[in-house]
Image (spheres, rainbow, N blue to C red):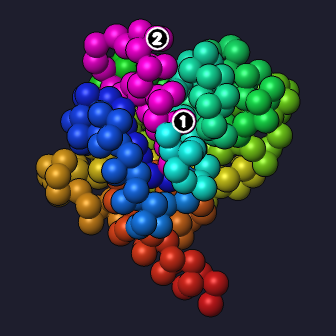
Amino acid sequence: MAILNRTPDSFFDQGATYSLDALLRRAERCVAEGADLLDVGGVRAGPGPEVPLQEELERVLPAIEALSARFDLPISVDTWRAEVAEAAFAAGAVLGNDISGFSDPRYLEVAARAGASVVATHIRLAPRVADPEPCYPGDDVVGAVEGRLRELLARALESGVPADRVVLDAGLDLGKTTAQSIELLRASDRLAAIGPVLLLSASNKTFLGAFLGLALEDRREASLAAAALGVARGCRVLRVHDVAGTRRVADVLAALLAS
């Protein structure tokens, strides 16, 4: 899953693909490098200025329409607003990547009606809200995340989204300390056992930089190592910035695990 940000303040590229032309050029590179899925987002997950609904629509819809016309690949929309998801599905997206854990009560209804898939993500508070000291009952972050993901799966099923159209995401760095994110990555096999496909979104994240004090631009190898561990422990969707490197890692792991 290639990350395509139509935001001026994304944590990694800092707006490098904010213009539509730049985003389409990056998409072309990602497709050439082996992307299977293109994930378009118009609002960063972290704290920042408010992005009104209309502005988010104006950022993501032209991108989704253009990508759908150019590439024979599924398109994902990274949004927690049901109105944006609904418009994105009409424009050609087939997956709603909601990091808020379906905080919008209409989100699952919209996805079910469109026949779309969804990503059910664990987050402790809410997107764009700082959470510097997250804690979990009994210090059991894996148990808390597992329980919440099971709840989100049940909500999706009750709303008419079948299990084979639900993807789970532990939400690394989303309301987790470095140690908690590492613990969740190590427990990917336990989370994958819930049933639906498990997504890993670890690329260039803060918890990876903490190992060796790595600056944001120096986390490529750490991201690839996390991807390798994730695949080995059951993750089957990798949301990444480095498509070419991660594609090679995933292909090697697939061959090794199959032999």
Q: Image quarter for residue 121? A: top right
Identified by mark 1, the residue type is Glu
Q: What x and y, as percent, mark residue 190?
A: 63, 55
Q: What x and y, as percent, mark residue 157?
A: 82, 33
Decide if residue 137 is in sight here: no
Q: What x and y, as percent, mark residue 31?
A: 46, 60
| Residue 7 in the image: above or below residue 173 | above
| Residue 83 in the image: above or below residue 192 | above
Which residue shows up at 17% across the image and 57% down it? 218
Q: What x and y, as percent, mark residue 34?
A: 47, 67
Identified by mark 2, the residue type is Gln
Which residue shows up at 59% across the image and 81% down it? 257
Front residue of 224/114: it is 114
Q: On the rendered image, what quadrant is the C terminus found in?
A: bottom right
Task: Measure the alpha-carbon separation of dots 2 and 1.
Answer: 16 Å
Q: Earlier in the sequence, mark 2 or mark 1?
A: 2
Packing grade of label 2 (10 A; few <14, some 14-19, many >=20) is: few
Front residue of 86/226: it is 86
Front residue of 66/138: it is 66
Q: In the visual, does 103 lie left or right of 5?
A: right
Task: Check residue 54 in the rendering and tell me which mark sits there, or answer none.
Answer: 2
Q: In the visual, does 214 lie left or right of 172?
A: left
Q: Is residue 156 magenta?
A: no
| Residue 211 in the image: above or below residue 159 | below
Dot 1: what SS?
Answer: helix
Front residue of 104/71: it is 71
Q: Is residue 59 magenta?
A: yes
Q: Image quarter for residue 114? A: top right
Between disc 2 and disc 1, the foreground one is 1
Residue occupied by mark 1:
65
| Residue 221 in the image: above or below residue 95 | below
Q: Which residues are magenta?
A: 38-65
